[in-house]
């Protein structure tokens, strides 16, 4: 294939679940309600029709991870993409194998409104419309809440949360004029379930969840749909180059240093054994192609769905005991001297 042409935003892959057997639950799991995966609903309810027209999708953070995988999947299905990234000069070659007739590459930093507007305009000039936005750009911030500087907190929220708002604001005028569109906002399992050392990242994703739900209600009158994508843990650069470690931890001056170092090592080891980004890319392409109303939330992966079910089945106290009991990750300074309520209980 010829390289994609360039017009001259970071990935948001995610943390995993607390892993223990469901046998420790005192009551049965509830069914997953409004956040089922559509293919499961189709098997129960008779199948959805798929759109045949090519759908133009704007992707932020398209140079790697979920964004790149989604660009590959969408173009393989014949859909055009507006692939945006902060540094096309460096990263555009990552898309060189894609069909250039289906790809417009544009520079986009989700913290810079001027670059966002220019990227949307480049896509509209090339393809004439934007049918879907894959609001994917973001990064993880790792470390205890106490250690976070004002700049670290502001940057995390500005990128992961405010960046998604800016992107939605940029594409919505065209979607309202078209009287159709889809906005796929990337959240995370962390948008439902909070773990130690990922508090600020989780805060940004909880904000995304609330904003996305409100936006869904607001734009439905123009036939614009909003869904919240909730991936779990996947093997990608999110756990390495796209995970920012708080300066206090990175420099070895955190009062939580022992736990932070151990948990980060364990987290990265676990992530390396997880599946790649393909299932997320498949979900994005399926969402783009679905003609029916999208579910509000779209969790990806059986482990993600089971963890959400577990959390819903437990009280806050039960869940806290479960997190405290996950000593494989969080042993050390956090709970030293605190009795482990799950110790010696069958797993």
Image (cartoon, rainbow, N blue to C red):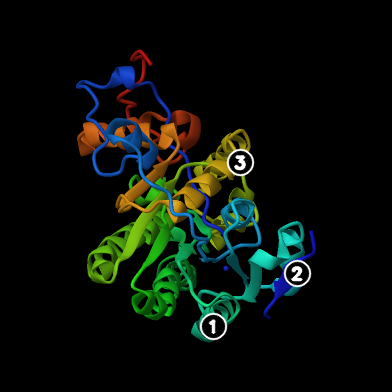
Image-quadrant location for residue 345: top left
Q: Give the alpha-carbon distance from disc 2 to disc 1, as whole Å.
A: 22 Å
Image-quadrant location for residue 234: top right
Residue drawn where x is 22% and y is 22% of the image = 28
Residue 23 visible, this angle: yes
Q: Give the alpha-carbon distance from disc 2 to disc 3, as whole Å.
A: 23 Å
Closer to the chain start, of discs 2 and 3, is: 2
* Few, some or many residues within 10 Å of mark 2 (<14, 14–19, 20+): few
- Provide the secondary structure element on which disc 2 rests: helix
Q: Looking at the figure, which quarter contains the C terminus? A: top left
Q: Which residue is mark 3?
A: 276
Q: Are marks 2 and 1 in contact (CB under 8 Å)?
A: no
The circle on residue 121 is: 1
Closer to the chain start, of discs 2 and 1, is: 2
Residue 196 visible, this angle: no
The circle on residue 90 is: 2
- Provide the secondary structure element on which disc 1 rests: helix
């Amino acid at each position: 294939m010829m390289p994609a042409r360039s017009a001259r935003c970071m990935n948001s892959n995610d943390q995993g679940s607390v892993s223990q057997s469901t046998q420790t639950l005192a009551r049965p799991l509830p069914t997953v309600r409004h956040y089922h995966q559509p293919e499961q609903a189709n098997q129960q309810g008779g199948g959805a029709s798929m759109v045949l027209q090519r759908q133009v999708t704007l992707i932020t953070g398209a140079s790697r991870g979920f964004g790149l995988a989604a660009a590959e999947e969408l173009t393989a299905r014949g859909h055009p993409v507006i692939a945006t990234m902060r540094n096309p000069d460096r990263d555009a070659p990552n898309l060189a194998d894609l069909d250039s007739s289906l790809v417009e590459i544009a520079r986009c930093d989700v913290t810079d409104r001027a670059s966002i507007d220019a990227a949307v305009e480049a896509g509209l000039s090339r393809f004439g419309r934007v049918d879907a936005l894959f609001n994917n750009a973001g990064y993880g911030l790792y470390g205890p809440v106490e250690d976070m500087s004002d700049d670290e907190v502001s940057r995390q929220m500005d990128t992961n949360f405010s960046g998604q708002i800016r992107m939605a604001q940029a594409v919505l005028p065209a979607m309202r004029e078209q009287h159709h569109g889809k906005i796929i906002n990337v959240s995370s399992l962390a948008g439902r379930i909070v773990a130690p050392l990922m508090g600020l990242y989780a805060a940004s994703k909880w904000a995304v969840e609330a904003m996305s739900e409100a936006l869904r209600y607001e734009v439905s009158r123009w036939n614009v749909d909003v869904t919240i994508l909730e991936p779990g843990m996947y093997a990608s650069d999110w756990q390495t180059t796209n995970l920012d470690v708080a300066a206090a931890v990175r420099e070895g001056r955190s009062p939580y240093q022992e736990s932070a170092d151990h948990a980060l090592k364990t987290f990265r080891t676990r992530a390396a054994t997880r599946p790649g980004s393909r299932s997320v890319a498949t979900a994005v392409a399926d969402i783009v192609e679905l003609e029916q109303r999208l579910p509000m939330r779209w969790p990806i992966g059986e482990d993600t769905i089971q963890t959400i079910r577990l959390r819903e089945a437990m009280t806050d106290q039960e869940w806290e005991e479960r997190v405290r009991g996950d000593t494989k990750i969080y042993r050390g300074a956090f709970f030293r001297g605190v009795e482990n309520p799950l110790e010696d209980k069958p797993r």
